[in-house]
Image: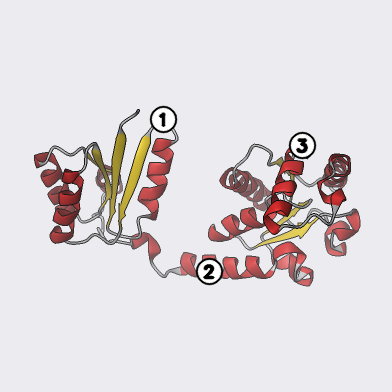
Amino acid sequence: MSNLYQIYLISDATGETLDRIFIAIKAQFKNINYKVHTYSFTRTENQILKILENAEQEKNSIILYSIVDSNLAKYLAKNSDMKKIPCFGVLGDLILSFSKLLNQKASHQPSGQYALDEDYYKRIEAIQFTMNHDDGNLVKEIKQSDVILLGVSRTSKTPTAIFLANKGLKTSNIPLITEDSIPEILKKNPKTSCVVGLNTEPERLVEIRKNRMNSLKENTNKLYTDLEQIKKEVDMAKNTFKKYKWPSIDVTRKSVEETAASVIKIYEIFKENA
């Protein structure tokens, strides 16, 4: 049986950055048995000592931290070393290096990335817009969108739209049932908006839809999960994207994050050529 590693994630803010970094790290190791202990808003030496007491009692403890207060970070590193607990800072060296390159002193302000600035309010506005324009709602306002996602049912349109909204992009998503599902304004002016088609392999779509129906305990529409019918839907979608010369993304083996990254690239190219 593999060792159980106790992973301590210590942050002086929400811990979101640190959590993402650990996800990226563990993805590189196939066999790792671990338990995560998350400590957010850690900003005093007393908090540090209590965490280290817990870590010391466990076997195979490892500490990852993102603390911008240099004195507190040094305190954690020093005491971890004394207790022989492996401890790794994920921001300190980067902040110091950037400080030298930019020739300016870092603010060392916890939660600095969450400042209520223009970008923050832009994201909030984009999220509100995207929620209001989900699943073909408010198509009369479609031209206000930064990005318009188009695709047959269960091609990750909504989660991708929400992810894009968190990046500050006002995103509408429209279910593609037939070509008539597309708003007339897009068909008449197909290149004046950033429209991106989402598609997937029919066999994979069958599985996703069946799982969806099972979770909802609904089995009324057999055509919704019929492979031959889905093949027709997928072909119709591909032909529609080609007809209007809209870029499309095969989401079969893509995570929402990967799909969103591809959409953002398409959007950036669209803006350059607009």
Q: CA distance from mark 3 to mark 2?
A: 37 Å
Q: CA distance from mark 3 to mark 1?
A: 30 Å
Residue occupying the point 73% across, 63% down: 135
Query: Which mark lies nearer to you, 3 or 2?
Result: 3
Q: Earlier in the sequence, mark 3 or mark 1?
A: 1
Give percent across and percent down for residue 17.
Answer: 38, 51
Give percent across and percent down for residue 23.
Answer: 42, 42
For mark 2, does the 10 Å Cα neighbourhood hold few (<14), some (14 to 19), or many (20 or more) residues? some
Which amino acid type corresponds to the residue marked 3 in the rendered image? Glu
Residue occupying the point 37% across, 35% down: 33
Which quadrant of the structure image shows residue 116? bottom left
> Can residue 242 be seen from the camera position used here?
yes
Which quadrant of the structure image shows residue 181? bottom right
| Label annotation for residue 203 | 3
Q: Which residue is mark 2?
A: 124
Which quadrant of the structure image shows residue 57? top left
For mark 1, does the 10 Å Cα neighbourhood hold few (<14), some (14 to 19), or many (20 or more) residues? few
Residue occupying the point 73% across, 53% down: 213
Q: Name the image colouring.
A: secondary structure
144, above or below 205, in the image: below
Give percent across and percent down for residue 210.
Answer: 74, 47
